[in-house]
Image: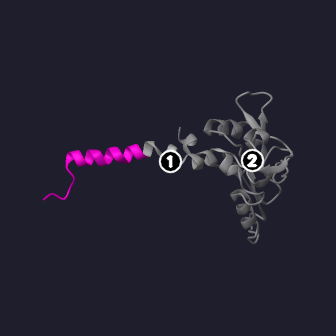
Amino acid sequence: RKDRLSGRDQSLLERGYYEQMLDMDRHFARLWKAQLQEPAGWAQIGSITEPDPVDPFIWQLRPNLDLQFKRARLTTNAARMRDRVYPAEVPPKTWRAAIIGASGTMGSGVADGHNFESLVETRLGAEPPSARYEGYEMINFSVPGYDVLRRLYQLEDRVFDWHPDAVILVSIGIRDAE
């Protein structure tokens, strides 16, 4: 007696398994259809971005937005950032970081003030002042759909104008690995 299937039985087992996988769309058609549909009021990325007037391969957040985006309140400032308003010059005794990423880093589907950059800034601000720094700013330059090359372009074109002490490049997902 053997503890494994014969070659013929193994083949039949695999064939049945893979046939079932190929047939899943038929068995789960309603679920599949529901997953592909966007919920009512689900805004598209084009509702929060617009093309750059100079470079057709770059887009940016629309300024001064206040809307529901993916079931969460999303606002942008006049500088086209999903963030509070910051002065261009770094205040004295303030450490400033620039964060660059895509939709996840921007906080797509997360309410204002609850994206990770806002939470980190709030947490750092709760610390007692040090001899070197009294305040911390985490400025979110993230734009949905930006790949690594667009983030580098943004770093050179916009971010350095804000004089950050550090730049945090966040890469999440398959697009960043390409």
- Mark 2 to mark 1 CA distance (whole Å): 27 Å
Look at the image and tell me whether residue 172 can be seen. Answer: no
Task: Tell me the residue at 67%/45% (across/down).
Answer: 37
Task: Tell me the residue at 12%/59% (across/down).
Answer: 1
Is 63 part of what is drawn in magenta? no
The type of residue carrying mark 2 is: Trp
Whether residue 63 sits left or right of residue 137 in the image: it is right
Instruction: Name the foreground residue: 147 vs 126.
Output: 147
Q: Position of residue 169 (x, y in %)?
A: 63, 47
Q: Is residue 125 above or below residue 12?
A: below
The type of residue carrying mark 1 is: His
Q: Secondary structure at mark 2?
A: loop
Report which residue position mark 1 lands on: 27
Could you tell me what secondary structure mostly forms the magenta stretch? helix
Q: Earlier in the sequence, mark 2 or mark 1?
A: 1
Whether residue 22 sits left or right of residue 34 in the image: it is left
Q: Position of residue 116 (x, y in %)?
A: 69, 58
Q: Position of residue 117 (x, y in %)?
A: 71, 57
Return the mark for residue 42. Answer: 2
Tell me how the rendering is colored. one colour
Task: Tell me the residue at 41%/46% (across/down).
Answer: 20
Q: Are marks 2 and 1 in contact (CB under 8 Å)?
A: no
Instruction: Name the foreground residue: 78 vs 145.
Output: 145
Instruction: Name the foreground residue: 68 vs 136.
Output: 68
Q: Secondary structure at mark 1?
A: helix
Q: Position of residue 6 (x, y in %)?
A: 19, 49
Return the mark for residue 172. Answer: none
Binning the other alpha carbons within 10 Å of mark 1 as few (below 14), some (14 to 19) or many (20 upward) gives: few
Instruction: Name the foreground residue: 90 vs 19.
Output: 19
Q: Which residue range is magenta in the image?
A: 1-20
